[in-house]
Amino acid sequence: MHKEGVCLGFCNQEALKSSQAYQETDAFKNRSEKASKNMRIENERPETSVSIHSGGSTSFETHNKRLEIKFGRPTKVNDLYLHTHTKKHDGKTFTDARSVDVHLSIQYIFRLF
């Protein structure tokens, strides 16, 4: 669907109209604002924010299979985490502060075993 609300031939016109009508309600606007605020909370309180994934719509299972092929071995927990929590999957530039903390925790925990 385009921003203008035009179907590309694969959506139901009634469903589109219903969705557009719902998006104009106060209930939707309040829910949307709350969700936006929750995503912005990192700047205020990083310890309570949600990690941002950089995997897009690709499932973790698919990312994991691709990494196994790339590495030629089964992936480790940290391999998949680094791939899905760093920008452009570079393994270095984390998407947010919480992702760095979790990465360090994973490293610490697996050193214990």
Image: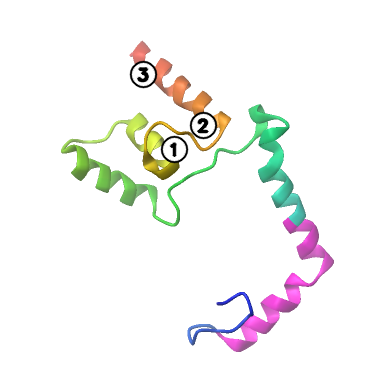
How far across and how far down the image is residue 31, in percent? 75, 57
Give the answer, above or below, for where 73 lies relative to 30. above
Q: Quadrant of residue 98?
A: top right
Q: Which mark is residue 99?
A: 2
Residue with the most extreme top position: 112
How far apart, in angstroms, are the residues tagged by discs 2 and 1?
8 Å
**Three-letter amino acid code at disc 2?**
Ser
Residue at the image point whose x is 42% and y is 15% from the top: 108
Quadrant of the image for the N terminus? bottom right
How far across and how far down the image is residue 60, in percent? 38, 47
Q: Report the predominant secondary structure element of the magenta stretch.
A: helix
Label 2 neighbourhood size at 10 Å, few (<14), some (14-19), many (20+)? many
Q: Quadrant of residue 68?
A: top left
**Three-letter amino acid code at disc 1?**
Thr
Residue at the image point whose x is 42% and y is 23% from the top: 106
Residue at the image point whose x is 40% and y is 20% from the top: 107
Q: Which residue is mark 1?
A: 86
Question: Do labels 1 and 3 touch, CB within 8 Å?
Answer: no
How far apart, in angstroms, are the residues tagged by discs 2 and 3?
17 Å
How far across and how far down the image is residue 54, in percent? 46, 46
Question: The magenta stretch spans which residues?
Answer: 12-32
